[in-house]
């Protein structure tokens, strides 16, 4: 693998190809006549899913399907918004104007991703304000990865390469999700995430070819973010609560362990290009399976972080709550303006 600074991350083009194929499949599904189960609503739902067509907000769906989507899309949206904090912390301290502008654009993208996803969740009959309140009260979660601190500039690179890289592997199959609004949102999100991964890879590539101190900083960041990134795919398949049903409904297309393996295979080769080492002495290519063997993350740590015991859980929610409270006057003003317009139109 070869890499030129500012170019495409080695091995990532295949994922973008999958996004393009998913986008074409979305358009093809919209043009096909709908599958039907006659007057049996459940049979009609099953027929649409089996035919790889899309369930739309107007369609009948099982309550379990709706609740699963609300939980998953809300968690995804919350993660995009909370995820602005670790990197936003470095906007004012970026090492150059160019890096500052790129990072600012990336954090802005994350806000947009949250907007797309909250809008998709609203099509399922839940308001954005409800979702915010469930997040702030602890009734809904966000990705555990954002509860770790960004200690150095190299952490911004590690987040881009590893965290956004894991997100792309996890999210590209969601472009084929059976629920139309979610699938359509994911098309754009995945295209933008590929830029985010490229930004992080380029930061680490530059640091790895800098001074000894810069190279050491890059390696330290990779050492700290590797296992939390592996944990982003969730618990092992044998302990996953929701995966089997989500795959039956074609919300998910691959299991947690399948996606984790795909991520390891991709990043192990990219690390060679970077000239950095992944912190796993057991990492080794197995010619028989065509995959890399690796050490699993500490799933006990994952569950502890999800439960609120991570390094930055309380800080992240406190900042989000403060932002929500500080923005109350904007929401109230917008609601009052909308009410006044309705009165004038009546």
Image: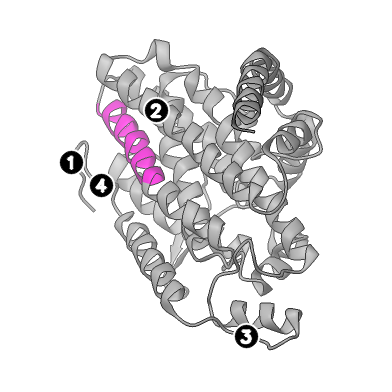
Q: Which of the two marks, 2 or 3, is nearer to us in this view?
A: 3
- Looking at the rendered structure, which numbered label has been put on residue 8? 4
Q: Secondary structure at mark 2?
A: helix
Task: Indicate left or right for 11 with 26 as reference.
Answer: left
Q: Earlier in the sequence, mark 2 or mark 3?
A: 3
Location of residue 27 with respect to 234 vertically, above or below? below
* 10 Å crowding of disc 3: few (<14), some (14-19), many (20+): some
Q: Quadrant of residue 3?
A: top left
Provide the secondary structure element on which disc 1 rests. loop
Mark 3 to mark 4 CA distance (whole Å): 43 Å
What is the spatial separation of the Cα atoms under label 1 and label 3, in whole angstroms? 51 Å
- Tell me where residue 183 appears, x and y as whole percent: 51, 59
Q: Which residue is mark 3?
A: 36
Label drawn at residue 180: none
Q: Earlier in the sequence, mark 3 or mark 4?
A: 4
Other-residue count near label 1 (Cα within 10 Å), few / some / many at <14 / 14–19 / ≥20 = few
Which numbered disc, 1 or 3, marks the residue closer to the eye?
3
Q: Residue at x 62, y 60 (%)?
A: 256
Question: Which residue was labeled with disc 1?
Answer: 4
Mark 1 or 4: in front is: 4
Q: Residue furthest left?
A: 4
Which residue does the numbered mark 2 point to in the structure image?
218
What is the distance, in whole Å, between disc 2 and disc 3 at their CAs?
55 Å
Q: Is residue 17 magenta?
A: no
């Amino acid at each position: 693998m070869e890499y030129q600074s500012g170019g495409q991350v080695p091995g990532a083009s295949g994922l973008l190809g999958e996004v393009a194929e998913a986008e074409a499949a979305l358009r093809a599904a919209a043009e096909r006549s709908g599958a039907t189960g006659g007057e049996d609503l459940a049979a009609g739902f099953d027929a649409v899913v089996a035919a790889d067509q899309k369930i739309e907000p107007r369609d009948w769906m099982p309550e379990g399907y709706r609740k699963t989507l609300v939980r998953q899309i809300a968690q995804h949206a919350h993660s995009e918004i909370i995820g602005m904090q670790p990197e936003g912390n470095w906007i004012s301290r970026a090492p150059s104007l160019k890096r500052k502008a790129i990072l600012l654009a990336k954090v802005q993208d994350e806000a947009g991703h949250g907007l797309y996803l909250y809008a998709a969740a609203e099509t399922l009959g839940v308001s954005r304000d409800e979702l915010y309140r469930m997040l702030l009260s602890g009734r809904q979660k966000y990705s555990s990865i954002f509860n770790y601190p960004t200690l150095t500039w190299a952490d911004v690179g590690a987040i881009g390469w590893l965290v956004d890289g894991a997100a792309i592997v996890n999210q590209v199959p969601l472009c084929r999700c059976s629920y139309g609004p979610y699938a359509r949102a994911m098309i754009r999100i995945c295209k933008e995430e590929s830029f985010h991964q490229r930004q992080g890879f380029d930061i680490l590539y530059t640091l790895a070819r800098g001074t000894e101190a810069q190279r050491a900083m890059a390696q330290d960041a990779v050492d700290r973010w590797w296992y939390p990134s592996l944990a982003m795919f969730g618990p092992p398949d044998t302990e996953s609560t929701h995966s089997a049903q989500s795959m039956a409904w074609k919300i998910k297309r691959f299991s947690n362990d399948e996606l984790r393996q795909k991520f390891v295979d991709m990043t192990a080769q990219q690390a060679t290009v970077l000239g950095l080492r992944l912190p796993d002495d057991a990492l080794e290519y197995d010619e028989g399976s065509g995959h890399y063997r690796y050490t699993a993350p500490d799933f006990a740590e994952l569950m502890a972080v999800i439960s609120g015991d991570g390094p930055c859980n309380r800080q992240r929610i406190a900042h989000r709550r403060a932002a929500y409270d500080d923005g109350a006057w904007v929401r109230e003003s917008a609601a009052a303006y909308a009410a006044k317009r309705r009165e004038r139109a009546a």
